[in-house]
Image (cartoon, helix red, strand yellow):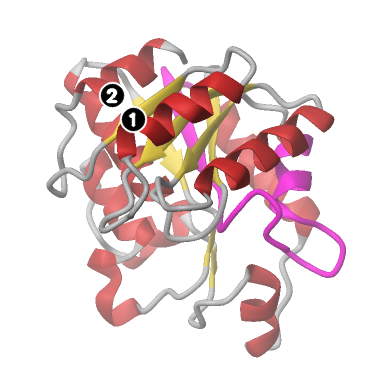
Amino acid sequence: MPAVFVTATGTDIGKTFVAAGLIRHFRAAGRAVGAIKPVVSGFDPVAADGSDPGIILSALGRPLVLTEIERISPWRFKVPLSPDMAAQREGRTIDFNALVDFSRRAMDVSRDMLLIEGVGGVMAPLDAGHTVLDWMTALRLPLILVVGSYLGSISHTLTALHVLARRNLATAAVVVSETPGSAAPFDDTIDSIARFADSIEAIGLPRLPAGSAAHPAFERLAGLL
């Protein structure tokens, strides 16, 4: 079954924005699509509609109820810290093997496409000995790397691509999500990343209204999956 892992160079870069846009694009095209966001830090049940699971459920057309949130995001933590720190604050840990098994079970469900959204950046710690990179290595899915257009993003992007290549992970595309108020020119940032990205396609995604799936970037990205 086709599946893809959505990761990023850091937190608050735009993973959920990209995942939700792709979900809406696939649904508009009549394709059956699923999505999970297994690990979430900074989750406030009172404001669940604006949370990452809430945004994903809205894109999927699923109700925002606890059973649905638990179905796609079983590891939820209140504090907006790295997952290992957030779990520690609650006296909990993330069972890495259980996380991998949960992801694989989602991959076994019959549908046209599954999106697995990571947490934080490529090297965000999950527990005392594992990072998001280890999670992606265990699943060995094609990756969408979401990056920003802030000053310094080019270096962060190329560093992340180097790390992923060292693990022999296939990056399907780099999505340059526009950073509001950045001093770095958006188009020039995309061009520079594309020039150094070893034939990996770099797709620019301007900031769009919430819920949008009509931008050509989503069609272009979907065509690579």
Horizontal side, residue 159 vs residue 212: left or right: right
Real-space CA distance between mark 2 and mark 1, rounded to the nearest whole angstrom: 7 Å
Judged from the image, the secondary structure of the residue bearing numbered disc 2 is helix
Residue at screen point 30% across, 59% down:
54
Q: Which residue is mark 1?
A: 204
Q: Which residue is mark 2?
A: 217
Q: Tag 2: residue type? A: Ala
- Judged by depth in the image, the label closer to the viewer, 2 or 1, is 1
Question: Residue 17's x, y, as percent?
Answer: 32, 46
**Does residue 215 belong to the magenta stretch?**
no
Residue at screen point 78% across, 67% down:
127
Q: Are marks 2 and 1 in contact (CB under 8 Å)?
A: yes
Residue at screen point 56% across, 37% down:
106
Relative to 200, is 97 above or below?
A: below
Residue at screen point 25% across, 66% down:
50
Front-most of residues 99 and 83: 83
> Which residues are drawn in magenta?
109-138
Of callouts 2 and 1, the N-terminal one:
1
**Does residue 126 belong to the magenta stretch?**
yes
* Magenta-drawn stretch, dominant element (helix, strand or loop): loop
Q: Tag 1: residue type? A: Gly
Front-most of residues 193 and 127: 193
Q: Residues within 10 Å of mark 2 (few under 14, many from 20)?
A: some
